[in-house]
Amino acid sequence: DGGITQSPKYLFRKEGQNVTLSCEQNLNHDAMYWYRQDPGQGLRLIYYSQIVNDFQKGDIAEGYSVSREKKESFPLTVTSAQKNPTAFYLCASSIVGLDTGELFFGEGSRLTVL
Amino acid sequence: AQSVTQLDSQVPVFEEAPVELRCNYSSSVSVYLFWYVQYPNQGLQLLLKYLSGSTLVESINGFEAEFNKSQTSFHLRKPSVHISDTAEYFCAAVFAGNMLTFGGGTRLMVKP
């Protein structure tokens, strides 16, 4: 089955530690995205990538980093510089850019900072 | 800045009753509109979309939404809800080729 796989589903981290969230897709999509979801705030775009070895900052990129070394993979690192990292993180992909608006989402990773 | 507003954060409704989830967007020459659904602890799934053509769009599970340009709205409706419709619903828009913008979400709670 084609889809997007995020791991881990749940993650706990101590303050001051970096953590990396994995996102893999086998849909052969060019574009991939990371969103952060907080209650009542909808989804906010962290980073996106439309081609391998290239990515752009979204609305809330501070304290996060990404890489896109392979078409299938778009890992997100939550660094110790992110002041409020506890959230639900969603990875998505699409066939082309966001102009069509149809995104395919993974099941999310819930990060809790202790 | 372009924005999408979902007027209700929560909508409680009894099973088999009709429901309307409201969505308004900031005016734009060009806009594509979407509704996504999120079941608990899952990612989002596309429910329906308006790109062009008929202003009334339908999903396979009985939801429909109507693009109203004069009122800049894209409300989601279902004539009779089921318990399984309990989820969070997100309205989203693409304005003139820019990035997808999400509303804050509406939690639909269907009670028996």
Image (cartoon, rainbow, N blue to C red):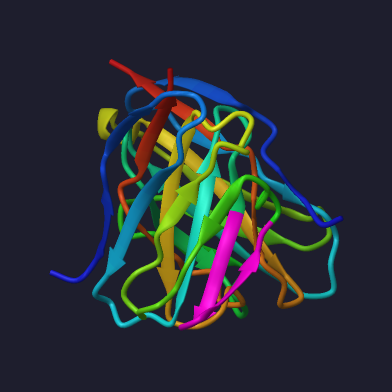
| Residue B73 vertical position relative to residue B58 in the rendered view, above or below | above
In the depicted structure, whether residue B100 falls above or below residue B20? below
| Observer-nearest of A47 and B27 | A47
Picture coordinates of residue B3, whole percent (x, y): 77, 51
Q: Main secondary structure of the magenta part?
A: strand
> Residue A113, position in %: x, y?
45, 24
**What quarter of the picture does the N terminus of chain A occupy?**
bottom left
- Tell me which residue sits at (71%, 77%) in the image: B97
Q: Residue furthest left?
A: A1
Q: Examine the image and state in which quarter residue B98 appears.
A: bottom right
Answer with the quarter of the image where residue A14 lies: top left
- Which residue lies at the image location 67% right of the left edge and 67% below the top edge? B99
Magenta residue span: A46-58
Q: Residue at x 79, y 55 (%)?
A: B72
Q: Is residue A53 magenta?
A: yes
Nearest the viewer among B82 and A18 is A18
Instruction: Report the label total.
Output: 0
Residue B37 percent location from the top left of the image: 42, 46
Residue B61: x and y in percent read 31, 52
Q: Is residue A28 above or below residue B55?
A: below
| Viewer-nearest residue: B40 or A111 | A111
Foreground pick, B58 / A106: A106
- Membership of B36 in magenta stretch: no
Q: Residue furthest front?
A: A16
**Residue at x-position 35% and y-position 45%:** A108
A75 left or right, relative to A47: left
Position of residue B87 in the picture relative to residue A16 (left or right): left
Q: Quadrant of the C terminus of chain A?
A: top left
Q: In the image, is A16 to the left or to the right of A44?
A: left
